[in-house]
Structures are given as structure tokens and as C-alpha cells.
Image (cartoon, grey):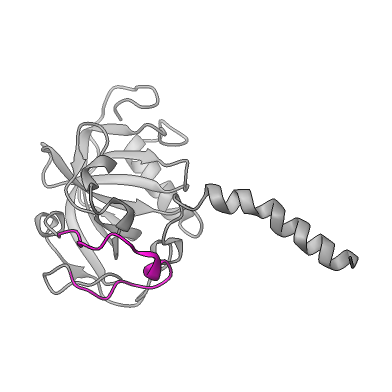
Amino acid sequence: MPRRLLAALLAAWTLLPLAASGAVDHERWAIKTHFRHPRQKPKLVALSELKRLPSFTQDKWSDFDASYIPDSPGEGLHEGDMVKTRGWIQALKYSADDDDYHIQMVDDSTGGSECFIVEVPKAGFEALRRKILTTCSQGKYTEFSRSGNRMEHPVPCVVAGQLFYDASHGSDPGARGIKGRKASTAWEIHPVKSVTWTGHPKRSRPSGGGGEL
């Protein structure tokens, strides 16, 4: 067998376990890490409306691994639209499986039982992640906990980014919630393009990873 062909086969064989292990964690990766309309002016949508967006009944999404879902969930919205919403950040975590920041937003500073999820990838979003980490941890941590940190005092902000449907959780969106909250929908803002603070975190007691900020 020619050496070049043998080398190519060995390289492909080496990568197979990596691709298999990341198949679930990186589902629809090309969609949720890039903007479809990066120059589009974000549409202001109330957080309460985003939380009510329904799941689709379809349960097989392989046709949309690298393409946007054309159907609308209502409110004149479509996957890939640039949107923005006002709310409070209630909890955050560093997701080790895909390097994303998982951020939970609630309607008001008292929280409630449900949340809306927005996510910030790592590659290309380093500056935004530093801004979020510094502001929400008040400089106490070098990274959010993998199990999640709950804000002792939720932080008011406006989040802008791309509307994305997390198809793998369409049948059970609540399972993604942390720190006493359940996600009310499988729709997210993912990736986040910007966060504008409309207030500042109140001073809180220092705590270890996985605790309050």
C-alpha cells in the first residue's frame, strides 16, 4: 500500500473516536456558532414572548445539521433572525462539553421557576466572555463553575444575538435548566453577539465554585 494512502487512512481512523464522542455535544454546530445575518438590526422581543415559543413536533433533525430550520415558531420569527431582549441574568455556567457559556435569563430580579437560555461560544467570542465573567463575578473568579453559579442578585441587561432552536432538547427543554430553574422553551439566543448592562451586580459575599456570585 502506498505510504501516503496508509498515512491518510491512519489519520482518519485516529479521528473517528473524537468525532463520535463529540457528535451529541456539537449537534448543529455550524448553525449555533455563526451568525446568519450578522449585519441585521436585532428585533426587540419581550423575554416573556421568547419563553413561550413552542417546540416543533418533528423529532429528526439530521437534515438541518448545517442549515437553518425554515418553519416559524410564531411572532413572525425564524431561526437565524437577530433578536434582542431585556431581562436579568440569574445563573451561569461553563459547559465543558462544548466550551459554551450557558446563561439563564429571567423576567425580573425575583426570578421565578422558568428561564430562557442564551449561550456564548468560545472561539471568536473571547472578549465578550471576559466581559461577562468580570461583570457577573465582580472579578472574583477566573472561570464560572461547571456545575453553575447562581447570582445572589440577578443582573439586569439587554442581550442580542441569533435565534436558535436546540433541536436535541425540543421534547424536554426544561432539563437544561440549572440552579432551581427550568428552561421554558428549546429556543435560545445562540450565539450571543452583545450584552449591554442596564445595572450592576450588588456586592455579595464571596463563595466557592458552584455557589452564589
Q: Is residue 2 above or below residue 200?
A: below
Is 63 inside the magenta-drawn segment? yes
Count of residue discs: 0
Considering the whole magenta stretch, tell me its main secondary structure: loop
Of all residues, the one furthest to the front in this rendering is 1
Tell me: 53 left or right of 150: left
Indicate the position of residue 115 as horizontal and vertical percent values: 18, 45
Q: Is residue 124 above or below residue 129?
A: below
Q: Is residue 21 visible?
A: yes
Q: Quadrant of the N terminus?
A: bottom right
Residues shaded magenta:
54-72
- The image quadrant that residue 66 belongs to is bottom left
- The image quadrant that residue 52 belongs to is bottom left
Indicate the position of residue 172 as horizontal and vertical percent values: 23, 46
Which residue sits at x=11%, y=44%? Answer: 108
Q: Is residue 166 visible?
A: no
Indicate the position of residue 179 as horizontal and vertical percent values: 25, 32
Q: Quadrant of the C terminus?
A: top left
Which residue sits at x=37%, y=31%? Answer: 147
